[in-house]
Image (tube, rainbow, N blue to C red):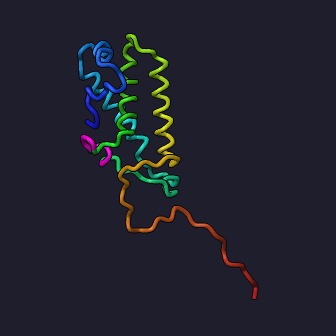
Amino acid sequence: MFITVPELNTIIYEYQLAQIVEQNSDIALTAIATAEQEVRSYLTSNNLKQWQDGRPRYDVDVIFSAQGTGRNALIMQHVKTIAVWYVCQLSNPDIIYEHIKERYDRAIDYLKRISKGEVTLNLPILEESAEPKQPFRFGSRTKFNHE
């Protein structure tokens, strides 16, 4: 996994997490895996022509296989925020729901900006293929003369 359950303590207090998941770490692990998949979906390019506009195409497998200090701190923070959002859907003991919802919305908004190419992070980029990409052609026919 990209992050561990104890690393969630930068977003949620340990006693709050324990209260929500009722000492079942599988719930927290499922939330972390779900959050990781959500963040991956924002960083992964698709086959639409709009992705061929020059924006970076991140190597998601390298990003999420990094360990320890090799992980991108900002991506880690967003994964943790989204994971806590999924955990907090179970219960709300002494956590202000609006505060968690606001953090989640900010994280998702930031990830959308990354996927649109408005923000660029220092993350591994996919290697471009050797063949040149031509997403479309334009022009007109040569002028026809009756001569």
Residue 89 lies left or right of residue 52; in this view the side is: left
Q: Please identify the quarter of the rendering in which residue 41 is found.
A: top left
Indicate yes or no whether the magenta region holds residue 117. no
Q: What main secondary structure does the magenta stretch of the protein show?
A: helix
Instruction: Report the label total.
Output: 0
Q: Please identify the quarter of the rendering in which residue 7 is found.
A: top left
Which quarter shows the N terminus? top left
Measured as percent of width and height from the top left, residue 30 is found at 29, 27
Residue at position x 41%, y 14% in the image: 95
Residue 4 lies left or right of residue 94; in this view the side is: left
Magenta segment boundaries in residue numbering: 62-69
Measured as percent of width and height from the top left, residue 54 is found at 50, 58
Give the residue at the far right of this rendering: 146
Q: Is residue 134 above or below residue 97?
A: below
Measured as percent of width and height from the top left, residue 125 is found at 38, 54
Residue at position x 40%, y 46% in the image: 44
Residue at position x 48%, y 38% in the image: 110
Measured as percent of width and height from the top left, residue 56 is found at 44, 53
Q: Is residue 136 above or below residue 67?
A: below
